[in-house]
Amino acid sequence: MSLTGLQKTSSIALLALTIPLFTACGGQGQPTATTILPTVATAPTAQVAPTADAAPTAEVVPTAETAPTAEAPASGELESGFPMRFKHAQFGVVNHLYYTDRERVLTLDGIAGFTWVRQQVVWRDIEGPTAGNYAWGELDQIVPDVAKKGQKLLVSIVRSPAFYEASGGMPSDPKTMGNFVEAMAKRYGDQIAAYEIWNEPNLQQENGGTVVPDDAGKYVELLVECYKRIKAVSPAAFVIAAPPSSTGVNDPTKAVSDEVWYRTMYSYKDGLVKQYFDAQGVHPGGSANPPETMYPSEPYTVEGCPAELGSCWTNDATFYFRHVENVRRFMVEEGVGDHQIWITEYGWATKNSTPGYEFGSFVSEQQQSDYIIGAMKLINDKYVDKDGKPWVGAAFLWNMNYAVLWQQQNDPLHEQASFGILNGDYSPRLAFTAIQGYLSQIKQERAQQ
């Protein structure tokens, strides 16, 4: 369900398809829909031409043998001590690498200049039908394929097996997930550079059907267990605290506001969590609001917003990218300001046909490009502390290749596709080319420092 809370509530149909479940995060600054990702083995039924303002595919997709790859950050990029921190903000992208042309997608990641990849991993699709029985499947190819391209991999782990939690929410016994992440760390070693423990746990659908503030304490117990188990095997791997959905909603049948979630999590058992995570995951909104705007100090007005859409996602801070600044303030006030933020999803939708994401109709492809670069510049240039050190350690754009997947399902206007920086035929959107230029510029500037 696409919950807005501060405006209307609408539903998104579930596609009964065959590959792993993906929690869709549309960046609207509210709890977002859970859908099943389309199968990528299905060939499209018709050829779709690039959009008019897209560059020819051949200029962006060289052969695998000639394509450059991004240089992943070396250990020298890290500060010493705990918590683990980067000296410069890292930039990554969210991919879907299951049952698709991974070589092509990862090649495009490198061409764009991204050094990190985020891939969601569905726990219940790997462990079963009985406890401790792991079938790693396609992940055994995904992990080394990312490593071969010189990229760093962040895995985001979601969905309990039914024998641990019938709803797929967080397991009642943290040790069960501890066993899973330990097995993963032993299997893949340093090929997995970071683990994100759950996704948007302040939403009812991620938490067994209902959610209350005390569930933040339940999450801390899960995070602590997973941190200990991962670090015992891979001490150099980052462990990321789950990003709450950016929302002001407090309703047990829908969500806990992200501010309540953060503050409850940090204060649980006198701050137990402070020693058991490296960085805080955050999913700032965007809606149709430019990255430099903010409610209530610098609100945005969406031109042409119809009356039935009310405020058009402009009248609450959680609808804005700069809400990440509020999260930073919460962390400082709660005594965890020494931990960096990792923005593990951000982005802007364009025109799409998915209910609840109508704000995309007010964002052109040129605006999408401008807004993404604007957000990257805030992260790189402005989000630093009084000593000039970055408080955002890494940022992952949502997304690279979902337009390709939805095109193959004859649904090119799905909201997930509209957030992408590729068209359904792999040709680049304006944002791809702009990102390529900006990340190249950053690389050159850092080399001269």
Image (cartoon, rainbow, N blue to C red):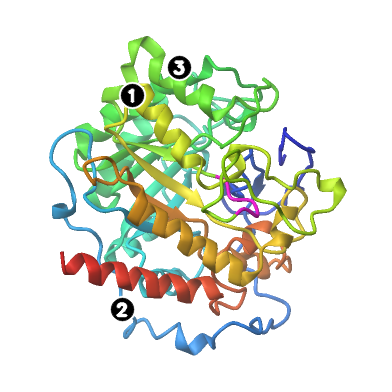
Instruction: Write down the residue under mark 1.
Output: 225
For residue 68, above or below residue 318: below
Q: Residue furthest front?
A: 297
Image x and y of residue 160, in percent: 52, 32
Q: Residue 76: within the magenta?
A: no
Residue 217, label in figure: 3
Q: Is residue 190 left or right of residue 371?
A: left
Instruction: Write down the residue under mark 2.
Output: 68
Label 3 vs 2, first from the N-terminus: 2
For the residues labelled 1 and 2, the Cα–Cα distance comes to 39 Å
Residue 185, label in figure: none
Q: What residue type is labelled 3?
A: Gly
Q: In which quarter of the image is residue 71?
A: bottom left
* Observer-nearest of 312 and 78: 312
Prevalent SS, magenta region: loop
For residue 313, above or below residue 76: above
Q: What residue type is labelled 2?
A: Pro
Q: How crowded is mark 2: few (under 14 residues within 10 Å), some or many (20 or more)?
A: some
Q: Is mark 3 on a helix, strand or loop?
A: helix
Q: What stretch is highlighted in magenta?
A: 285-289
